[in-house]
Image: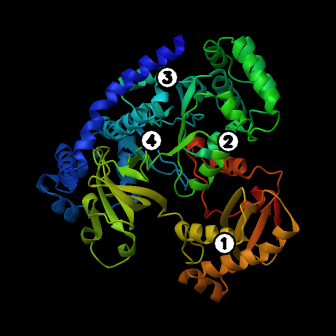
Amino acid sequence: MFKKLLYFFVNAVLFALWTKPYYCFKKRSASIEKVQRSILLRIVRRNSKTFFGKRHSFNEINNVDAFRMRIPLFTYDTYSAYVDLIREGKQNVLTREPVLALIPSSGSTAPSKYIPFTKGLKQEFLNGISPWMFDLFVNTRKLMFGSTYWSITPVGKNNTKNGRLKIGFDEDGEYLGKVERFFMSKLLSVPKEVSQIKNMEVFRYITLLFLLKDKNLSYVSVWNPTFLMLLLKSTVGWSELLVSDIRDGAITIPVNMDLNLKQTILEKLNRDRKRADELSAVFARWGRRPTVLLEGISLYEAIWPNLTLISCWADGNATRDAHELKTFFPNVKVQPKGLLATEGIVSFPLVGEDGAIVSINSHFFEFIEIEKADTAEEPFQQTKLVHQLQMGKLYSVVITTSGGLYRYRLQDIIKVVGFKNECPLIHFVSKENNISDLFGEKLNEYHVSRVLNEALKNHSLSPSFWMIAPEKGLPDGDYFYTVFLQLSHQSNRVGNLLKSLSEQIEEKLQDNYHYRYCRNLGQLSKLRLFVINSDCNAQETYLRACQSSGQRLGAIKIATLSSKMGWAKTFGGNFV
């Protein structure tokens, strides 16, 4: 009872901090054109004397049209030279405010981008996070009485240039203000020091150790649902050791770890015999059947009876994983996160709404209509503003932020699915720039996702993993695209469907003129299927391959399309 009262007090303080930003957002969502203009002019005036601002005559910009006419649309390639100057310690390059850190990007492609993070950008994130949290807690009162798990993942290499500038954050909490971080730290189930563990097996074990010990867990926030599922799948195998360590307040996983770090973590792990006995009873009842429902609940719901909500990606490619996560927690609400990027916050969810609302109080937004993106029109004519978006249309997102990105193409495709007041509600669809192009075939993830999902549905197949990527055959050295599938069961019926499945995918891919042209020229051979062995954990294998290339584990998105070759060697299985 004492803990619940403590959690209520801390959550009440945070709730009070979120109240003003929520009502500010609610008021401004009825006049978004005026609000967006004000945000843009504030950013431009504040940074008019920077190197970038002088180069683009910010002092002559006094309205939205002038800004769009004077500043071209940019991708990261344009900004990389400016970021290099910032890494060398130069000031007033993109922003008047000092850069607090450079944050490596993550997503469907390898993280080759470093995004400047400033105090102003942090406030812009808070302008979206605060109303999101207020709406969530006011509509889910049970969260007030519990603790939370905010995803932390092992830190990568923290490179600096002559010690001048920090690269990356150790935890996502650094996006919050100091007061919010202080009170949030009182709610966390897993201490932040766990992020310092570099060995993945040790990291998962100790994370589970703290999570299982916490019966009051009510809210889980992760990025990729796959991250959470892979973490939980280790629970049953380690159950006896975990329960024993909770009972004794010990860490006995048989893998070496830094002794000083282990001691620091041990100081936060008090013995809890009562909780250990509760968990022993739960594991004894479910055995090795975590998703089997007993009296309507799963093993994981029995472990965390107060868990009320899980926040994670659930749009685009993450849709399939979010659906699978529901088999772990059939009675727990899963709330899609909206569109949050390293560069900025585009949208956040509201309880009861389909889609996430555009965070109009954060950055200045523009949108490129997808069907017009390849025309010969000038960029100024191509972009739409927030108040000009139309129901049902697809757009590519462009942002201008206090972090020093101006007319920056996120290359994220969104779809407008509704409105609240004047403010659009959107779904993330796919990455615009996730393209595989060996010979000019220009396959893009959006088209590939539609083709694969339709084909699998038509053949009544529900694989646990699927992806398409190019391969090079032997001994002829021909190139072809491959659909990688891991089937939940193998039967004669499934085997008979694979040929038909392959033919339909190949036919639909040829709706792409460039792919069809490469096939006709013989640059690409016919698409093939690769069935991944059932004893291979395809998701885990994919994540480890991406992590080895430098991506941050918790933020890796499993893509439907990969431009990387060699997946047949990475996965265990056979071509069929």
Question: Which residue in the protein does label 3 denote?
Answer: 145
User: Which amino acid lies under the numbered mark 3 shown in the image of this protein?
Assistant: Phe
Closer to the N terminus: mark 4 or mark 1? 4
Residue at the image position 60 percent from the left and 42 percent from the top: 553
Mark 2 is surrounded, within 10 Å at the Cα level, by few (under 14), some (14 to 19) or many (20 or more) other residues, namely many
User: Which amino acid lies under the numbered mark 4 shown in the image of this protein?
Assistant: Ile
Question: Which residue in the protein does label 4 denote?
Answer: 103
User: Which amino acid lies under the numbered mark 2 shown in the image of this protein?
Assistant: Phe
Closer to the N terminus: mark 1 or mark 3? 3
Label 4, label 1: how many angstroms apart (C-alpha)?
38 Å
- Marking on residue 455: 1
Closer to the N terminus: mark 2 or mark 1? 2
Asked whether 516 or 151 is in front, the reply is 151
**Can residue 478 be seen in the rendering of this structure?**
no
Residue at the image position 24 percent from the left and 68 percent from the top: 380
Camera-nearest label, 2 or 4: 2
Label 2 sits on a secondary structure element that is: helix
Question: Which residue in the protein does label 2 denote?
Answer: 328
Label 2, label 3: how many angstroms apart (C-alpha)?
23 Å
Label 2, label 1: how many angstroms apart (C-alpha)?
26 Å
